[in-house]
Amino acid sequence: IILLQTPNTTAPPSSASTMFSAVLRSVLPSLRSLSPVPSFGTFVRSSLGFRKESPFSLMGVREKSCLKTNKSAAKRFIVRGKGRIKRGKEGRSHNTGHKGRKRVNRLAASAPITEGKIEERMRLIIRA
């Protein structure tokens, strides 16, 4: 490819750094019109007083939660369609030879968690 330089045109940038600076110069005026993103440590007034706000909250990025899912609990408890938490009954995994058939069948059925406080705690643990 042969480039012909005329007096009216500018010469193409010679290196990547000059190309970057040319692009930056062309984009800078449009970036200046945007409102600045707050720095880390910006305090915002809330109903509980002042709290520190992350600049990522303005960009739509959620902050990571500190509470991890308890995987052993998540495998034992299941959320039903209406939102109640279902658990399995104990006593059916082994040593069922001496138990009656009626009793073993009854132990096979699932049961809901009925206490409200325990259900809310389980909901936090299994992240449901």
Image (cartoon, rainbow, N blue to C red):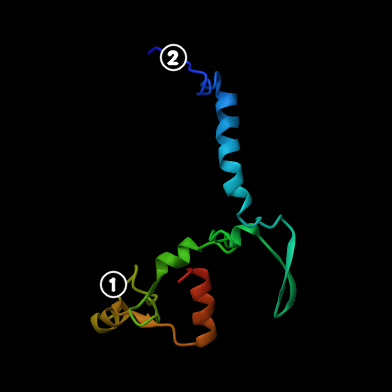
Closest to the observer, 105 or 80: 80
Task: Give the residue number, with chain letter if any, for mark 2.
Answer: 4
**Residue located 65% across and 56% down the image:** 37
**Residue located 56% across and 38% down the image:** 26
**Residue located 35% across and 78% down the image:** 80
Q: Amino acid at mark 2?
A: Leu
Task: Using the image, determine if residue 92 lies above or below residue 27.
Answer: below
Q: Report helix, strand or loop for mark 1.
A: loop
Quadrant of the image containing the N terminus: top left
The quarter holding residue 49 reads bottom right
| x, y percent for residue 92 | 34, 73
Closest to the observer, 21 or 120: 21
Q: Residue furthest front?
A: 7
Task: Give the residue number, with chain letter if any, for mark 1.
Answer: 97
Q: CA distance from mark 2 to mark 1?
A: 94 Å
Decide which of tag 2 and tag 1 comes sooner along the chain.
2
Q: Amino acid at mark 1?
A: Gly
Q: Report helix, strand or loop for mark 2.
A: loop
Position of 58 with respect to 113 (left or right) is right
Mark 1 is surrounded, within 10 Å at the Cα level, by few (under 14), some (14 to 19) or many (20 or more) other residues, namely few
| x, y percent for residue 44 | 72, 69
